[in-house]
């Protein structure tokens, strides 16, 4: 966490505090979700996406052209009855991340669940038959 020293430059609103130093804590923008753990088992690939504080309804999980795309769009709606803000920093955030899937993934059986701030995506594997090796007799 970085600490910045800033001066309050709004004299009309906070008259008595003008020019006095204020400690402001600045944290780097979160890359959450974004951190992804990928685990391979004998039967599936398992993705765990860190996404704390979000609702499962805003997530989208799509497969197109053998590419898995995980994303969300979180819009914070403004309440007109809440009054007029002098400064408002709430807004909306979006996130999208894509993964090229191996041919061994069964795209029809992909499942996703969201629990305890983690989006879990299970990508079941399909058994690819071993190529048949056939000996041909030379005549």
Image (tube, grey):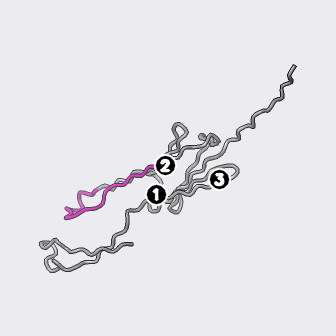
Which labelled disc corresponds to residue 70? 2
Q: Quadrant of the N terminus?
A: bottom left
- Cα gap from disc 3 to disc 2, whole angstroms: 18 Å
Contact between labelled residues 2 and 3, with CB atoms less than 8 Å apart: no
Relative to 27, is 136 above or below? above
Relative to 14, is 111 above or below? above
Q: Residues within 10 Å of mark 1 (few under 14, many from 20)?
A: many
Image quadrant in which you'd find residue 4: bottom left
Contact between labelled residues 2 and 1, with CB atoms less than 8 Å apart: yes
Mark 3 or mark 2, whichever is nearer to me: 3
Camera-side residue: 80 or 119?
119
Secondary structure beneath label 1: loop
Secondary structure beneath label 2: strand
Relative to 58, is 84 above or below? below
Which labelled disc corresponds to residue 33? 1
> Residue 135, image x and y in percent?
84, 29
Q: Residues within 10 Å of mark 2 (few under 14, many from 20)?
A: many
For disc 3, the marked residue is: 40
The boundaries of the magenta stretch are: 78-97
Q: Quadrant of the C terminus?
A: top right
Image quadrant in which you'd find residue 23: bottom left
């Amino acid at each position: 966490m970085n600490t910045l020293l800033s001066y309050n430059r709004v004299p009309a609103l906070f008259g008595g505090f003008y020019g006095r130093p204020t400690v402001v804590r600045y944290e780097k923008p979160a890359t959450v979700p974004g951190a992804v753990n990928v685990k391979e088992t004998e039967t599936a690939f398992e993705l765990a996406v860190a996404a704390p504080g979000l609702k499962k309804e805003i997530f989208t999980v799509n497969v197109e052209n053998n590419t898995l795309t995980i994303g969300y769009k979180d819009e914070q709606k403004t309440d007109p009855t809440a009054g007029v803000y002098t400064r408002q920093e709430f807004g909306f955030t979006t996130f999208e991340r894509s993964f090229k899937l191996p041919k061994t993934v069964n795209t029809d059986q992909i499942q996703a669940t969201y629990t305890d701030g983690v989006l879990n995506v299970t990508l079941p594997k399909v058994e690819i038959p071993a190529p048949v090796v056939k000996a041909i007799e030379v005549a």
